[in-house]
Amino acid sequence: MDGALRAVVTGASSGIGAATVRRLRAEGWSVLAVARREERLRALAAETGCEPCPADLTDPDDVARVAQAAGACSALVNNAGGAVGTDPVATGDPADWQRMFDVNVLATLRVTQALLPALRASGRGDVLVMSSTAAHVVYEGGGGYAAAKHAEGALARTLRLELAGDPVRVIEIAPGMVRTEEFSLNRFGGDREKADAVYAGVREPLTAEDVADCVAWTLTRPHHVNVDLLVVRPLAQAAQHKVVREP
Ligand code: NDP
């Protein structure tokens, strides 16, 4: 791996983002790790040698700071995101939808816009978008999250068309069920029982490391090979609604 390769990973303080930082560092990348919680980023930096960059990606000034700290980089992993609640459309709180759009869609838009000049200038740039299977199918109670992830997927597909001819790949990874420490806990407002029920009886949900493996694989293909969309699920999840649960 060329030691000059440099990646910006958002949502790096936990779950898939932190696993991606570990994986890319292990493969010799220089990594700028972005999230709000500074202490976690500092611990990750001490462990892996990444550079911590505390920032709230819903704040345009913070995004400008990220771009400045990123400098000359060749890959952006837009991973920050998440779900809030499982209310049906009929009663969903618009404030929850707003939060999901802010962090999944508008943060991705802002960071991508801010880093595109550097990614283009690298001559071998990558914009990776961590969407979800919820970017492609909907499910009851997932209206706000699916709407935000569909929008994030639309951003990725549009950007790929608009960058045609530029040396920048646009890669979308759409994971199914991934058991990370915080995703479901955040979705259910800290309710551990509800969060654990998501994975109850499921043999081997994906791990953050499994998804980081996909990130590393897509980024390290020869640069003329653009993995447009990689859908990845655990064996126990044949489709969004088809999850095998053992008693
Ligand atoms: P986590 O909740 O563990 O990670 C979310 C990350 O986003 C955290 O590091 C959080 O850090 C960061 N983040 C949230 N808000 C902001 C913000 N305003 N500014 C900067 N960073 C922010 O979830 P996962 O690792 O499971 O998920 C990562 C991505 O993968 C998300 O986009 C999620 O939607 C997607 N995904 C997850 C699946 C799953 O089943 N877990 C399935 C499919 C897709 P901090 O709080 O420190 O800011």
Image (cartoon, grey):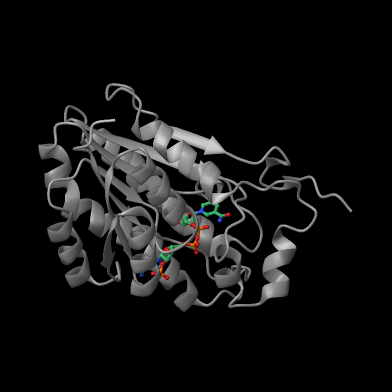
Look at 25% across and 72% down and name the residue there.
59
Asked if residue 106 can be seen in this view, the reply is no
Of the pair 140 and 213, the residue shown nearer to us:
213
How many numbered marks does the figure carry? 0
Q: Position of residue 190 (x, y in %)?
A: 60, 77
Residue 68 in the image: above or below residue 124 = below
Question: Left or right of 231: which side holds 199?
Answer: right
Q: Is residue 110 left or right of residue 25?
A: left
- Is residue 157 shown above or below 20? above
Which residue occupies 47% across, 70% down?
97
Residue 91 visible? The answer is yes
Quarter of the figure with residue 103: bottom left
Residue drawn at (27%, 21%) of the image: 224
Q: Quadrant of residue 195?
A: bottom right
Query: Quick one: which residue is furthest to the right in this view?
Result: 247
Please tell me whether residue 26 is drawn above or below residue 59 in the rendered image.
above
Residue at the far front in the pictured view: 46
Quadrant containing the N terminus in the rendered view: top left
242 relative position to 121: left or right:
right
Q: Position of residue 152 (x, y in %)?
A: 39, 51
